[in-house]
Amino acid sequence: MKPKKKSDLNRRIILGVETSCDDTSICILEAGEQNKILALNSYNQDFLLSKWGGVVPELAARSHVKAIPPLLEVSFKEANITPEDITEVAVTTHPGLVGSLLTGINLAKTFAMMKELPIIPVNHLYAHLEAIHLTEKVGYPYMGLLVSGGHTAFMWVTGPNEMEILGNTLDDAAGEAFDKGGKLLGVGYPAGRIIDELARGGDKDKFNFPISYMRDRPGKMSFSGLKTALRVKLQKMTPEEIKAETPDLCAGYQEAIVQTLRIKAEEVIEKVLNQKVKNFDTPIVIGGGVACNSRLKTVFQEKFKKVHVVKPVYSTDNAGMIANWAARVPELSVSFPECLGLDARSRFVEKK
C-alpha cells in the first residue's frame, strides 16, 4: 500500500450506502465547499417487483445482499481510489424497511471494523431535501416538500439537521397513492412514472377525483379516499372502457394528487407560517421520488415564486444524497468502535 501524500491527509472521502427500501446504491464522494461525487452506482428492483405491483420487504432485503458487491467494485474503479482512501462511511439508518436498512448498516459496520473508521448515521428524509445542494445553491431557511413512496410532508428547514414538520399525510404517501392507483389501473410498476407518462396524453378534466381538504387541520393530508374513489369508478366501467380511457383516468387521478399538494402548500404558508402566498419568497425545495413528476413541477413553478426541484438522478433513493448529507453534518459522526452499536429505525414521521 502506497503512503498517502500530505495533500491527501485532509481529504474527506465518504463511502455512502443506501438500502432503505428496494433501491441498492453506493456512492463515493469527496467532501468540500462543493461536494463532488466521484462515483455513484445504483441497482433498482423494478423488474422483480413489477410482478407484485410494489415492494416486497423480504425480496428487497435479499436483493440488496446480492447487489452490493458488484456496486462496490465498480464504484471504486470509477472513482479511481482504493478502500484505504475512505475516511468515513455514511449509511441510511432511518426511516425505511428494517430488513433492508440492516443490510446497508451491516455493510457500513463491516467496512468500519476493517479500517477502524467512523460512521455517520443518515436520516433518509433529510437527505432527500438536502440533495438540492448537489446541483443548486439554496440558502436557509427554505420550505421543503418531501414527496416519496413512504412519506409526504412539509418541513421548515433552517439547516442540514434542523427541520421542523409543518404538515404531513395521515395515511398514504403521495408516491403510495400513485402505486396503488397504478395497480388498480393495471398500468404496471413503478406506477408513478407510468401514470405521469400516460397522463400527458390524457384530459385531466374528464374524470374528477376528490380532494380531502381537511380545513380544520392545516397542513394535514389524506390520499386513502382518492384510491377508493378510483376503485369505485373502475368498478362501474367495462375493461374496454378502462383501456380506452386510461390516459384520461391517469391524468385526472394525478391531478387530484398534485392539486392536494398545491392546496396544502398554500395552507401551510398562510395558516402555519402566517404569510401571504403572493408575497411568499422563501425558497421551496421539492425532494423525494415524486419530485420527478412533471405535472407537480409545472404546477408549483406556476404558483410559487422560488421553486427548486431536486434533479431526478438525486430524487429517487440513491447513495449520492446520503453521502452529501453526511458531508454537511460532520458533527454527527460516530467514532469507532462506538459506531458498531448503531441500529435501524423504521419510522420517523408519525402519521397523526
Image (spheres, rainbow, N blue to C red):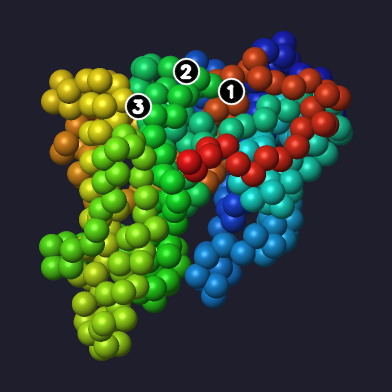
Mark 3 lies on residue: 143
Residue found at x 29% / y 38%: 216
Q: CA distance from mark 1 to mark 2?
A: 13 Å
Quick one: label 3 or label 2, which is nearer the N terminus?
3
Say if 346 sits above or below 224 in the image.
above
Image marks 1 and 2: residues in contact by CB distance under 8 Å: no
**Mark number, residue 327:** 1
Marks 1 and 2, the one that precedes in the sequence: 2
Write down the residue under mark 2: 159
Circle 2: element type: strand
Q: Residues within 10 Å of mark 2 (few under 14, many from 20)?
A: some
Q: Position of residue 10 (x, y in %)?
A: 68, 13
Asked whether the viewer can see residue 149, the reply is: yes
Q: CA distance from mark 3 to mark 2?
A: 11 Å
- Mark 3 in CB contact with mark 1 (< 8 angstroms): no
Q: Residue at x 39, y 29 (%)?
A: 166
